[in-house]
Image (cartoon, rainbow, N blue to C red):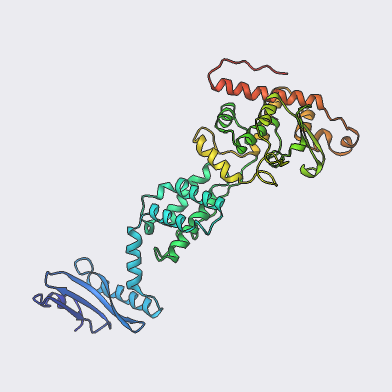
Amino acid sequence: MKLTQASIARLPTDKPDAIYYDDELDGFGIRIRAGGSRNFIVRYRLGGLERRHTVGSASVLNVEEARKKARKVLVAVDEGRDPTAEKATKRASASLLFSSVAADYLDAQQSAMKPRTLIESTRYLNRDWKPLHGLPLGTVSRATVSSHLREIAKKGGPTANRARSVLSAMYAWAIGEGLCETNPVDGTNKPDERRPRDRVLSDPELAAIWNAATDSDFGRIVKLLMLTAQRRNEIGELRWSEVDMASATITLPAERTKNGRAHTVPLSADALDILRSIPHRNERDVVYGDARGFAGWGAAKARLDEKLGNTVKPWTLHDLRRTGATRMADSGVQPHVIEAVLNHIGGHKGGVAGIYNRALYEPEKRAALDMLATYISTARAKAEGANVTRLRA
């Protein structure tokens, strides 16, 4: 019998469970149960086993619509796919919340990921992708991911692409676990995170970062970066043999500077206080970390950012160096002195002029960094409500 709307209407309903197959499409039929429910089904064989797949309810689909859907199921079977298993997987993934899958994924990666990578992945999934936590895993679409990536990119910094990568890795794992069929990150555009390197922190931001920096290795490094305007690794890999408390200086050897020239950094009273607070450990020459200096920058910065919350817009440690140079200029320090503080070769000390101009400007550098320390302490005082007037040089 060819199934039509008319022929289906004439089928008996007194049997407890009966299936009537179509003469036109092999395996296609309608299942009628005693309660009156009518569902179109398609029967197929895969791997030596016979299976039945529900196409849809006869109260929703007419027979021609159901026949078209049945043909698609049979095409999938010819391609070696199992439509019934795929449907069950989709149903299961629709009931799994993103938050629970993210937690399972992070738990599964405890031994596979490096500690720093695990911390970063946890932060991205729990912070940047938090708006997805209440959604079923299988309902997150490419459009949803793309839209949220744009929002993450607006915050600045190298965040959006890393967040995209972590989300993609989680979905790849979920597919391997049979929790979903597709990765909604596939096909999304990578955000353009290039930003001009001109971030200068405001006075309230400087104060907030200083106050949030604890008396840990990283906290002391952050404060010294503020007070000295040096590069991250120059302070993070600092040796006690490079520090002279008596003359209040740090002398960086040529092999530890970017331009290959030895560099003397005068220390303000605040910088000296920070160094005096650091205990010497087991006769190690390094001030921080292990034999090579401080490690774990990403995780330590992430903890500081979490403590800062929304009080400081996205920033980098290098912004402290740029901010120091800018604030020294704002306070009247001459450009050639700022270049000397930063150990820059260009500008006033570049080219032929640099060869003959061997002036080290040590007194001027010390005055400039003392002024920078005063600037920072003034910003901190103002953040606490003090009425302070800053003087120029």
x then y, percent, for residue 347:
80, 35
Q: Above or below — where is 74 with respect to 160?
A: below
The quadrant where residue 265 appears: top right
Of 262 and 146, the residue lying toward us: 262
Residue ranking furthest to the right? 356
31 left or right of 315 in image: left
Of 64 and 362, the residue lying toward us: 362
Residue 150 in sight here? yes
Give the position of the N terminus as an image quadrant. bottom left
164 left or right of 234 in image: left
Residue at 22% x, 70% y: name it.
62
x then y, percent, for residue 109:
49, 58
Residue at 59% x, 45% y: name it.
298
The quadrant where residue 217 appears: top right
x then y, percent, for residue 358:
88, 32
236 left or right of 179 in image: right
x then y, percent, for residue 166:
51, 54
Task: Give the tally of numbered discs.
Answer: 0
Give the position of the C terminus as an image quadrant. top right
Residue ranking furthest to the front? 282
Residue ranking furthest to the left? 14
Residue at 13% x, 74% y: name it.
9
Residue 149 in sight here? no
Of 195 and 82, the residue lying toward us: 82
Residue at 57% x, 15% y: name it.
387
Q: Above or below — where is 148 with respect to 180?
A: above
